[in-house]
Amino acid sequence: MCSSSPPCSARGQPPAPAPSPSKPGSSPSAAPSGFGFWTPFSWVSRWVQSQYELRVLPTVVDRVCGREVFTRKRLKVVPQAFGRVLEVGFGSGHNLPAYDWPRVAALVGVDPSAASLAIARRRLDEGLEAAESFVKAAKGKVELVEGSAECMPMLADQSFDCVVVGFSLCTIPDVRRALQECRRVLKDGREGGLLLFAEHGLAPEDDPRTRAWQRRLTPYWKTFAGGCNLDRDMEALIREAGFEFKSLEKKFSKGPKVASFFYTGVASKL
């Protein structure tokens, strides 16, 4: 939720094919195209949605991701980051106060949204003016990069001790490729190679009703929530990408059940 950009095909990987456009009367599982799901004025729909995503969505996401429930989840994992850290889906910088800055040598934040990164830079500048302690500790350590987690050729192999991802795997279009990129840039070794994550996603198997609603609502939810998917199995995605869990907590928090099943934990690179 808190971050999308077309995947690139550097290193010989072809981009994923574009989904077929939905049609009136098609299955609800097909993703609707823009706000005008059934309007003949598709160009108006596309323009309205582009303006929404450019001018409204970054502020909405910033406020939503600043809610207490998200703060509690990120505080469980972000302070564990150390050394050279990459944060994908950096968004507007809500994780900045959660880092244990004396343990962080450098932080590179990657996000495809220029508008969200502008909010993050403002947060750093305003924090500096207010003399917030995290900004003083972070001074000179933070580099923000506009780009997609699905392809990060500007980052060398095995160049980071930790990767932090908070409420972004739900939104990245090709999440499997993004996780492979995270694995690529992580160092090998016992002390490094850690993926620190806080995400929401697919409800547990023993709650089929919520799962069904997540799958039913996701195509429509994505349109208004910046591409956010309600029904991704974060545990399976992370494991399939070549990680082993060192810790994993899965539980519901307060809020609508379709959007409040959280996965938090630490996984190491295999």
Image (tube, rainbow, N blue to C red):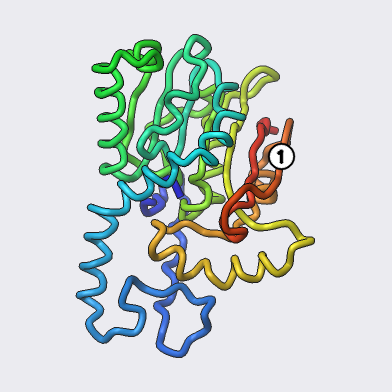
Q: Position of residue 215 (x, y in %)?
A: 59, 69
Q: Nearer the viewer, residue 196 or 95?
A: 95
Taking 96 as reference, is 51 left or right? left
**Which residue occupies 58% across, 49% down?**
200
In this view of the protein, can residue 140 be seen by the observer? no
Q: Position of residue 83 (x, y in %)?
A: 52, 15
Taking 112 as reference, is 99 left or right? right
Q: Nearer the viewer, residue 81 or 259?
A: 259
Label 1 environment density (alpha carbons within 10 Å; few <14, some 14–19, many ≥20): few
114 versus 222 height, above or below: above
Q: Residue under label 1, please give it.
A: 249
Q: Quadrant of residue 14?
A: bottom left
Taking 104 as reference, is 234 left or right? right
Picture quarter with the C terminus: top right
**Which residue occupies 33% across, 13% down?**
139
Q: Nearer the viewer, residue 192 or 81?
A: 81
Q: Position of residue 4 (x, y in %)?
A: 39, 51
In this view of the protein, can residue 23 be seen by the observer? yes
**Which residue occupies 31% across, 48% down?**
58
Residue type at the position of mark 1: Glu
Q: How many marks?
A: 1
**Which residue occupies 65% across, 44% down?**
263
Taking 93 as reference, is 83 left or right? right
Per the image, label 1 sits on a secondary structure element best described as strand
Q: Position of residue 102 (x, y in %)?
A: 49, 9
Q: Residue furthest bottom?
A: 25
